[in-house]
Image: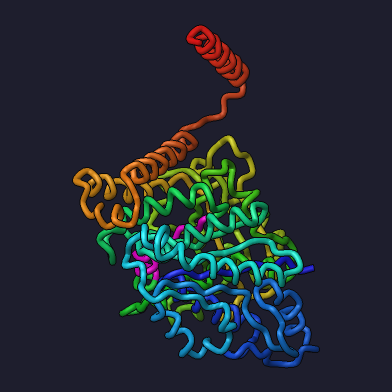
């Protein structure tokens, strides 16, 4: 039985990443642009590509596959571009849902006014896709947090999905505002309001940052003038690596739920750092022999991270390494042991074995073997600190607030969202500073109990 994932792409950025993701999926599953399977189904290699293709695709005719996707935007432009592109024939026209007016980079428009009018139609598409599944595992969403539609309407969709399907996993691939490159002036407002929602309604959030992607394209892939399509290709490669163990059989399996169980020690700390290996400049791959050690070194290297975070600024709570290709499990175990010994100080001491590994036999396109790295590190608090500091500067002077209040929001919502994000940063810091002290553990528990009892007595006296 296949456990399906329903994919949603919201807003301009989300749709462009989604489009790149589906072209990567089509290449991995040997599908033509119109969804027809190319090649002989009896072939052993083709058989394993068709075996679990239903995770993301629904078979509509003989060897004709349609993505389980919902394309949402508040303006028709991006979806018209997708329809006109080579990938346009792949999607069901009924699964595209767009408004006319756009959100105008305003979170409140996406979440409360324009988005709320369109969310019913989007939920109908999602419900229809979910009912066509045998055993849906969860939902994945691509969005950006700086604009209006991806952030405002994307979080509204998550809220609705959490209401309708509380027991399914929701994973979001969210593009966060970059430190230096800013496309939108009101990015800090939109991002803080979105993170506030993601904290409550998402199970796994993968943090992506345009500036880190630019530096990967420029410094690692040596592209002189990287375009958004090049950046999206890096994201879609990582996305395919994360879900590879669902789509292809392997020696050690993994899926969205297993990843969540192994990587999220506390429900609020579900923001992940991503990396991909190998990343080579054109022509350089011939000079380097790909081994498990080379992949592991690249995966743990800061220059391959998809977010502008330095691992030294925090500690790893947990990490997951997914290898693809002809990889021996003994080699992976050896490398994991080496990493844990070498980076012992960079891991928290109160989670003993904190690296999860999985191996998938089918390699990614164009490479013999590859690796995808997902880490839950306290260094990710740097992203939130930066956005929160920008938010504080603007909110202190109440700049741009009238655009949000005009859509029915009030000051309380902004303060609540800001406080929630600040609390998150404090939690990350606490977990980073926590140490294991087994001797004192019992005493601390007793002290806490005594404090609680004292507190309860005081409350009784007050009444």
Quarter of the image where one finds residue 152:
bottom left
Magenta residue check for 8: no
Q: Is residue 443 visible?
A: yes
As drawn, the residue found furthest toward the top would be 461
Q: Residue at x 59, y 83 (%)?
A: 92
Q: Tell me, what colour scheme is on the image?
A: rainbow
Position above or below: 139 against 412: below
Q: Position of residue 371 (x, y in %)?
A: 58, 66
203 or 441: which is nearer to us? 203
Q: Position of residue 320 (x, y in %)?
A: 60, 55
Q: Is residue 175 visible?
A: no
Q: Position of residue 397 (x, y in %)?
A: 19, 46
404 or 32: which is nearer to us? 404
The region drawn magenta spans 205-216
Q: Describe residue 279's horizontal placement relative to residue 391 as left or right.
A: right
45 or 385: which is nearer to us? 385
Question: Which quarter of the rendering shows the N terminus?
Answer: bottom right
Magenta residue check for 208: yes
Q: Residue at x 78, y 84 (%)?
A: 44
Quarter of the image where one finds residue 331:
bottom right
As drawn, the residue found furthest toward the left would be 397
Q: Residue at x 54, y 82 (%)?
A: 23
Q: How many marks?
A: 0
Q: Describe residue 55's horizontal placement relative to residue 381 as left or right.
A: right
Q: Residue at x 51, y 72 (%)?
A: 236
Q: Position of residue 417 (x, y in %)?
A: 39, 45
């Amino acid at each position: 039985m296949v456990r399906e994932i329903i994919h949603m792409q919201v807003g301009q950025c989300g749709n462009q990443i989604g489009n790149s993701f589906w072209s990567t999926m089509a290449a991995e599953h040997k599908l033509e642009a119109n969804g027809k399977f190319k090649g002989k189904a009896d072939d052993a290699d083709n058989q394993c590509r068709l075996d679990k293709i239903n995770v993301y695709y629904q078979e509509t005719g003989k060897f004709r596959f349609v993505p389980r996707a919902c394309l949402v935007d508040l303006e028709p432009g991006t979806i018209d571009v997708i329809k006109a592109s080579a990938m346009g024939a792949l999607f069901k026209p009924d699964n595209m849902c767009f408004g006319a007016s756009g959100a105008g980079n305003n979170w409140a428009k996406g979440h409360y006014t324009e988005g709320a009018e369109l969310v019913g139609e989007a939920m109908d598409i999602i419900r229809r896709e979910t009912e066509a599944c045998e055993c849906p595992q969860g939902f994945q969403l691509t969005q950006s947090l700086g604009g209006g539609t991806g952030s405002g309407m994307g979080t509204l969709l998550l809220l609705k999905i959490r209401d309708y399907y509380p027991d399914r996993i929701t994973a979001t691939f969210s593009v966060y505002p970059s430190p230096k490159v800013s496309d939108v002036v009101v990015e800090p407002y939109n991002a803080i309001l979105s993170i506030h929602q993601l904290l409550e309604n998402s199970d796994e959030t993968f943090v992506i940052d345009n500036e880190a992607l630019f530096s990967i394209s420029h410094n690692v892939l040596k592209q002189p003038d990287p375009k958004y399509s090049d950046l999206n290709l890096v994201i879609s490669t990582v996305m395919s690596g994360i879900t590879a163990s669902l789509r292809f059989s392997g020696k050690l399996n993994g899926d969205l739920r297993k990843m969540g169980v192994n990587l999220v020690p506390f429900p609020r700390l579900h923001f992940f750092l991503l990396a991909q290996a190998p990343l080579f400049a054109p022509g350089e791959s011939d000079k380097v022999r790909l081994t498990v050690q080379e992949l592991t070194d690249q995966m743990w290297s800061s220059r391959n991270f998809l977010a502008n975070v330095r691992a030294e600024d925090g500690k790893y709570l947990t990490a997951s390494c997914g290898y693809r290709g002809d990889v021996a499990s003994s080699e992976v175990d050896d490398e994991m042991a080496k990493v844990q010994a070498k980076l012992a100080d960079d891991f928290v001491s109160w989670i003993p074995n904190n690296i999860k590994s999985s191996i998938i036999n089918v390699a990614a396109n164009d490479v013999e073997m590859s690796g995808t790295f997902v880490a839950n590190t306290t260094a990710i608090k740097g992203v939130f600190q930066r956005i929160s500091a920008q938010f504080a500067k603007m909110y202190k002077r109440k700049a741009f607030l009238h655009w949000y209040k005009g859509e029915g929001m009030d000051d309380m919502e902004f303060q609540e969202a800001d406080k929630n994000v600040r609390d998150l940063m404090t939690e990350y810091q606490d977990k980073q500073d926590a140490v294991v002290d087994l001797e004192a553990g019992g005493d601390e528990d007793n002290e806490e109990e005594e404090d609680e009892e004292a507190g309860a007595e005081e409350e009784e006296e007050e009444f």
